[in-house]
Amino acid sequence: MGLLDDVIGAALGTISSQPAQGQYSQIASVLAKLLAPNAGARPTGQASPSGGLDELINQFRQNGLGDVINSWIGTGENQPVSPGQLRQALGRETVNDLSQQAGVSHDDLLAQLSKILPGVIDRLTPNGQLPNQADLLPGPRSH
């Protein structure tokens, strides 16, 4: 399993006390889609993958939530994010896509992500350092 898979699994494992396995696997796939770089054309030594965590950080910053996501990346206390703020940061199209993928309503998706996403990003960025984009690709770790 890759770094992203490990972190998502750990985050969902600490949150799930009830055995709603299908729901958590859907949220895990939503988190992977949100955070993994776009690997449509896997890099062959040329261009590095784009999107994923880097794009998410930019979306938060462009929508006035830079302080929130910076708190998740940094080593201090994680600021909470409301479902409404998350909707604002992700945008309608992304929320629609992720909601359809997970098979849940927008409100349910945003409520779950607002609880899980800060911890996932916090774990992906130990000591305030962003991971290498290649480490966020699905599959075995490159190191």
Image: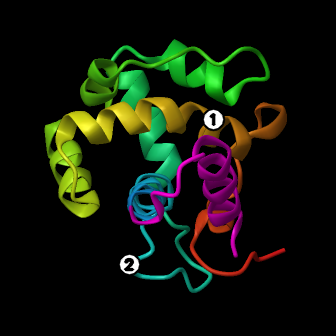
> Against 136, is 41 above or below?
below
Picture quarter with the C terminus: bottom right
For the point 51% across and 66% down, the residue is 49
How packed is label 2: few (under 14 Cα within 10 Å), some, or many (20 or more)?
A: few
For the point 63% across and 35% down, the residue is 119
How packed is label 1: few (under 14 Cα within 10 Å), some, or many (20 or more)?
A: many
When asked about the image quadrant of residue 142, the answer is: bottom right
Q: Is residue 17 magenta?
A: yes
Query: Which numbered tag is attached to residue 17?
Result: none
Q: Earlier in the sequence, mark 1 or mark 2?
A: 2
State the image coordinates of residue 131 (x, y, percent, origin top left): 71, 51
> Against 104, is 106 above or below?
above
Per the model, the C-alpha gap separating discs 1 and 2 is 27 Å
Q: Nearer the viewer, residue 39 or 85?
A: 85
State the image coordinates of residue 114 (x, y, percent, origin top left): 43, 30
Which residue carries the number 2 mark? Answer: 40
Q: Nearer the viewer, mark 1 or mark 2?
A: 1
**Left or right of residue 122, residue 32 in this image:** left
Query: Which numbered tag is attached to residue 119?
Result: 1
Which residue lies most toward the bottom here? 44
